[in-house]
Each structure stands twice: as structure tokens, then as C-alpha cells.
Amino acid sequence: MEIPGIGELRYDHLSGCYTSSPVTVPVLACRHSVLVELSDDDPAPQDFEVAVQNFLVLEPNALLHCAAAVFAYYLDVTADVLAAGDDDWFVEIATEEAVFDHIQLGSAGAVVVRRLSSGDRRVYVSLEFECDWEPEHGLQIGAARRQGRDEGRAIRWTPHQRGRLRR
């Protein structure tokens, strides 16, 4: 299987995903392998190609569009951590602008392309990272491009909170 922009994919039986060789990911300013969760019976496999192509044109500043949502996620997790008396995890982040200083955006994370199994069933590119305030679960940011909209405003970045899509 091949997807334009990330090339030939090989199937990994252990993970059940297709994996690319490392490719340049401009939004992360590094090279990264891409995992593709595509089943043989997917009704529209071309959606995966579109999602990958839209993702690969994002510039590094595109992540700034989700700073408010990521900061809100940080505040939610911090409130839970402090309420549980587990202040070993506490990290002070004063502003939205500073939140990315506490996320490891480099090649240590994962780039995963998947179709949601429920809800809108769109194909999303999910960025999964370690972050200072949630070392056990990390941070997941999902991106989807809405068809027919201006590219710069068509990306919806949403942090996932403990497996649930945050609204």
C-alpha cells in the first residue's frame, strides 16, 4: 500500500497498523514515521490520502491554533491532580502561549491516521506526545480538515482527554 506524501507503507502485525518510513512533517519541524490504521473493508480509503496530504502542508505555527484548547486541558488535568493531592505531577504554566514549552513535539511522539469508529466517522490525523503535566497519559491532538473550507481555517485541533474527544 502507498499513500502520496508518505510513500510505501508496510504492515506491522504486532500493532495492526501500516507504517511509513520517516518523512518530513513540517508542523513538527522533524522527520517522523506515520502510522495508518486502515482496515481492508474501509468504505473510503481515499479519505486517508486526503487527510495525510492536508496534514503535510501544515506549517509549524498551525499548532498555535490549538493553544487555548491545550491550555484548557492542562488546567483540567492540573485541577484533578491537585484535588487528588498528587502534586508530584504539578507543573506551573501561566499562559496559553507557554503551554507548548511543556510538550515534547519532536520525534518521540506518534503521528497516527485513523477513522473515528463513531460520531462523524471522519479520518483524523492524531499527534500523540509526552507532556510535563500529564506524564502518565500524555497529550493527543487531533486534526481534521473540513471539506470545502479555506485551508487555514479548516483545521480543527482538539486535545483528547483520557480517550474522549474534548469538545
Image (tube, helix red, strand yellow):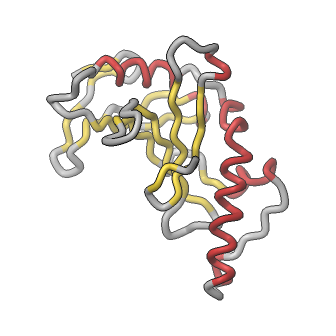
Q: Going by the picture, which residue comes out furthest to the right?
A: 94
Query: On screen, 9 above or below 98?
Result: above
Query: On screen, 163 above or below 37?
Result: below
Q: What residue is rendered at 23% in x and 49% in y?
A: 15
Q: What residue is rendered at 44% in x and 40% in y?
A: 111
Q: Going by the picture, which residue comes out furthest to the front?
A: 119
Quarter the N terminus occupies: top left
Q: How many marks?
A: 0
x and y percentages locating residue 126 in the rendered image: 46, 41
Q: Nearer the viewer, residue 62 or 143?
A: 143
x and y percentages locating residue 8 in the rendered image: 27, 23
x and y percentages locating residue 101 in the rendered image: 73, 53
Report the side of 115 relative to 63 (left or right).
Answer: left
Q: What residue is rendered at 34% in x and 42% in y?
A: 118
Query: On screen, 6 above or below 138?
Result: above
Report the side of 90 relative to 131 (left or right).
Answer: right
x and y percentages locating residue 44 in the rendered image: 27, 20
Q: Going by the picture, which residue comes out furthest to the bottom?
A: 85
Q: Nearer the viewer, residue 64 or 162?
A: 162
Image quadrant in which you'd find residue 158? top right
Q: What residue is rendered at 81% in x and 48% in y?
A: 97
